[in-house]
Image (cartoon, rainbow, N blue to C red):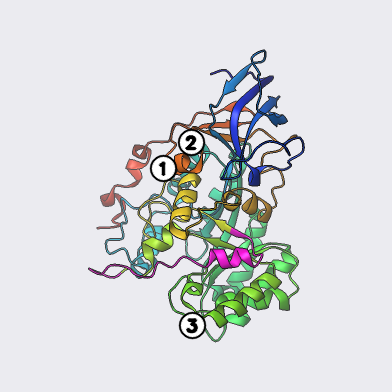
Amino acid sequence: MVFNPQSYWITNAHVAVSLLASLDGLETVPRTREDLLLVDLEICQGKIAQIVPQGDRAAAPSYNLRGGQVWPCFVDMHTHLDKGHIWPRSPNLDGTFETALNIVPQDSSKNWDFEDTYRRFEFGLKCSYAQGTKAIRTHIDSAGPQVPASWEVFKTLKQEWQDKIDLQGVTIMPLDIFLTPEGEQLADRVTEAGGMLGGVTLMNPDLDAQLDRVFSLAKERQLDLDFHVDESLNPDDISLRHVAAATLRHNFPGRVTCDHCCSLSVQDPQTVAKTIELVKEAEIAIVSLPMCNLYLQDRQSAETPRLRGVTLVRELKAAGVPVIFASDNCRDPFYGFGDHDMLEVFTQSVRIAHLDIPYGDWPQAVTLTPARVMDLPEVGQIGVGLPADLVLFKGRNYSELLARSQHDRIVLRNGQPIDTTLPEYAELDDLMVKEKKGVGS
């Protein structure tokens, strides 16, 4: 395989129409049943120079993809890199949400110093980068003694990885903290670190006051907001509606994102319609985390789960609400699996939410849509003049692409292949020794 650093062609490649920035010059190219086009892409000095109908490029340096697919690099808009990969020392042995909520603070209070957090955080970045992710938003636990170290790790890795991954950070903790002096100090710390504000919206008599405070803090500091919302199967949990109302009440100029929104899946049609209408009016983006929600929701000992907790992605998208899929937790008490692979996220989302037949523009939910919400104009699409940050797959159609893991993918950054070797779990072995700090026994 030859990728000339100056100029070469990727030939005989399928590209989804929804992932192209423009159809100029491709209007007459036949589309497959799945809305894929067979094209050739010229790469010059790290950028996409041309996208043209498939033809004979024998005279030029080229790589024949043999009908495989080209995607832009992925965007993973909801992760928890600070708590990732602690499962070996702090497993969740009953798999419930409540146990996860108890275990993580125990682990963080004993272990999350700068080195521990840095190494696990970077391990996640290594996995993401090797598998084709270019931008990540991570939620950072921001209540407890580990806060200074965690945000310092974020600042350090944001700088060290700036040429590889666009990294964003957001607070996660109970919203009532923002009603205290500690909350304002945290907002200042996050602003200095280049992060944004967020937290967990729980139904309570003070919810609107809590939201008003965090919206005011964010507005004063020109920060975006990103909330964990209604991560339950209780139909009375309608904090999503409260966030939408607060967005409108404050005429908030920044972007607001709400994640999970599981309770929407068990509410009556009238409640759903009213909430979605407000979400649309407030221009809120919704992030669905199907893998983690399947893991946690409706988990009961010795009983088969019946309610799976995936929010109403089809209905939201049909109403014009931006819908995004992301990986969420990886190998921690909230989700015992995961490998920071956005193709796996897309694959499982398609299967869980029946996003096939037709696939339509759902590939945008892990590429272009989160890139726009994260304000990354050159990420998440394929177009002339854009960086050649691409992922090449052998899968020629969606059935082939989603049937296998595609671990033999080629990841290009600035037009050149990177090392896609994943880091070995053994790198973290010394951090996982239970006896060292007494966690998880």
Q: Residues within 10 Å of mark 2 (few under 14, many from 20)?
A: many
Marker disc for residue 395: 2
The residue positioned 71% from the left and 43% from the top of the image is: 21
Picture coordinates of residue 297 (x, y %)?
38, 68
Amino acid at pointer 1:
Ala
Marker disc for residue 275: none
Q: Earlier in the sequence, mark 3 or mark 1?
A: 3
Which of these two is toward me, 208 or 372?
Answer: 372
Secondary structure at numbered mark 2: loop
Q: Residues within 10 Å of mark 3 (few under 14, many from 20)?
A: some
Tag 2–tag 1 contact (CB < 8 Å) = yes
Secondary structure at numbered mark 1: helix
Please name the residue that numbered disc 1 is placed on: 403
Magenta span: 300-323
Secondary structure at numbered mark 3: loop
Q: CA gap, disc 2 to disc 3? A: 43 Å
- Determine the residue located farthest toward the left in the rendered image: 302
